[in-house]
Amino acid sequence: MAKSKTTHTVLLRRLIQTVFLAIFFYLFYQLAYHPDNQTVGPTGLFFNLDPLIMLTVWFGGHAVASALLLSFITLISALIFGRWFCGWVCPFGALNNLFTSFRSGKRKDKLKEASYTPGQKTKYYIVVAVLAGSLFGINMAGWLDPFSFLYRSFATAVFPAVNAMFQGIFDWFYNVNPIGMKAISEPVYRLMRGYFLTLAQPHYYWGMLFGLLFGIIIAMNFFRARFWCRYICPLGGLLGIVGKNSAIRLNVDAEKCKNCMECVVECQGGAEPQSNETWKASECVYCWNCHSVCPTKAITFEFKAPGVRS
Amino acid sequence: MNILKWVSNFFNPPKEQKMDLGRRNVIAAGVAGLAGGLLAKVNPLDRGRTYNPGLIRPPGSLSEEEFLEKCIRCGECMKVCPTNVIQPTMLEAGMEGLWSPILKQELAYCEYKCNMCTQVCPTDAIKKMTLEEKQKVKIGLAYVDRSRCLPYAYARPCQVCYEQCPLTEKAIRLEDVSATTASGSKVTVKQPHVNAELCIGCGICQNKCPVSDQAAIRVTSVGETRNFRNQFLHADRYSG
C-alpha cells in the first residue's frame, strides 16, 4: 500500500511543537545571572501554563501565584479540544514524540508498541494520588510533573554534561593542537562561550541520578510510543480527565475504512483510532497522524458530542 | 441534529465512550495519595530541637511546612544561581523534601548582590523580593570554630572572613588579643567574632576560609528569617 503524503495539519503540528520546544530551550538558556541586568523574562512560562501545579499549590498552600492562573487557559481549552496541549505545546511531549519517531522495526512490532494497553490508566491514578496528597499539604506534583522533570533534568544533568563535553573538546584542541586546528577552534570557543557555554562548569550533587532518570524515560520511547505521556505523565492524566468528553472528536467513516490499522501504528497516544467505538478521547493527543496516514481518508476530526453520529 | 442530545451527551456520554477507570482503583489511588500526604506530616523536621542545621533554604523561602506545600522541585533556582550554591536535596530535608533546593555552602556562597532565585520561582515557594529586601533576609548564622580558626587555635594572623563579609557594617568584629604561638613567642592576633544581629548567613566567610575540608567558620540554619522557632535562643526557654 502506497504511503499517503503527510498532511498540512501534521506539518503544522510539527512546526508548532518545534517552536514551543525552541521557546523552552531559549527560556532555559537565557535564565542566567547577568551582573548589570537582573530582571528576568517569562522564565516560568510552561510552569504557569501547567494546571497540575496550579491545583496542587492551591490545594496545599491555599494561595496561588497570580502567574499560575494562566493555566486556566490550558484547563478550559482541554474541555473543548481534549489533550491538544500534550500533542502541540508540551516541550517534553515534543521530545518524546521525536524519539518515538526514531523507532525502527517491523510493522507488526510497531503495531504492538503503538496499541492501547490497560496500563495507560496508571497516569490517572497518579494524578488522583498527587491531588489527594496535596490536600494535606505535601506537593508531590514536582516529582512527576513533566515540566519539573524536564527542567530539573536539563538544569542538573543534561546542560552541565553538554557544557563539560564542549569544554573537553575545546580543551583538547587547545592542548593537542592537531594540524594547527587551534586557530579555528579558539574563535569558535570564544563565540560559544558568550552564548551557549557557561564560564564556570556547573556542578550538581546527584546530577548523574537525574540524568539516568531522564535517559530511562527517553529510552522507553523505543519500547512504547510516547511512553511517558501514555503511562506516567500526571499532567496528561489531568488533561485527559478534563477532556474526556471533548467536543472535537475523531470520526471514522466505516464505509471507507479498510481495516489496514495504519492509523493504530502511527497513533502517538495509543487511543485506538480504528473506529468510533474504540477511540479514547482521554488518550488522544490530537496529533492528527491517523488522519494523515489513512490511505482512504476515512478518518476526520469533527466538532461533535460523544456518541452523536454526524 | 438534536441539540439537546448533543448537550446531554457532552456531559454524560453513552457507555462505550465513557472513561472506565474503575471506582475501586480511583478510591485506592486517592487513599494512597492521602496516606502519602499524612505520612509526610509525621516527620519531626520542623519541631523542637530536631532542626537539620544543614538545611539552609534559598533566601526568601517560606517556612518549611509552607515551602513543601509549594515547591515543585523544578530546579529553576538551581539553574539561575550564579555561584551554583543551590543544590538538589536527597535526604537533607527528609523524604518529602526530596530534590528540593538547599544551599551547600561548602561548595559556594549566596551572592549578596543577587536575588535571582527569588525572581524565578514559579510557585512563590521562594518569595519575590527586591535586592534590598533580600539583603535583609537571614538564611542562617555563621559561627567560629575556635579549635580550627587560625588566630584562636594556632595564634596565626588571619582575617579573611572579616574582609570577605559583604555587609558594609561587617557582621564580623575583630578583637586584638595577645596569644602564644607554638614556639612560645607572644604575638597579638585579631580574633573574629560573629555579630548575630547582623549576620545573614550568606556563607562567603565559610567559602573563603583558608582552612581546608571543614572551614573554621561555618553557617547553620539557626536564626533564619523564615522560621521564628529556629532562633539561637529559644524564646520559650530563655528570657534573660
Image (spheres, coloured by chain):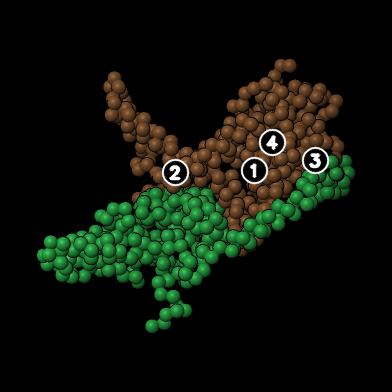
Chain colours: A brown, B green
Q: Chain of mark 3?
A: A
| Residue, disc 1 | A232
Q: Secondary structure at mark 4?
A: loop
| Residue, disc 3 | A304
Between disc 1 and disc 3, whose residue precedes? Answer: 1
Instruction: Tell whether B75 sits left or right of B186.
Output: right
**Residue displayed at 35% across by 71% down:** B197
x%, y% of residue B154? Answer: 20, 62
| Residue, disc 4 | A269
| Three-letter residue code for mark 3 | Lys
**Residue displayed at 42% across by 71% down:** B231
In three-dimensional space, the C-alpha distance between marks 1 and 3, rounded to whole angstroms, equals 29 Å
The quarter of the picture where the C terminus of chain B appears is bottom left
Do tags 2 and 4 sit on the same chain? yes
| Residue, disc 2 | A30
x%, y% of residue A146? Answer: 59, 44
| Three-letter residue code for mark 1 | Ile
Instruction: Tell whether B53 sits left or right of B6.
Output: left
In three-dimensional space, the C-alpha distance between marks 2 and 1, rounded to whole angstroms, equals 29 Å
Q: Please tell me whether mark 2 or mark 1 is closer to you in this view.
A: 1
The answer to whether residue A186 is above or below residue B46 is above
In three-dimensional space, the C-alpha distance between marks 3 and 2, rounded to whole angstroms, equals 43 Å
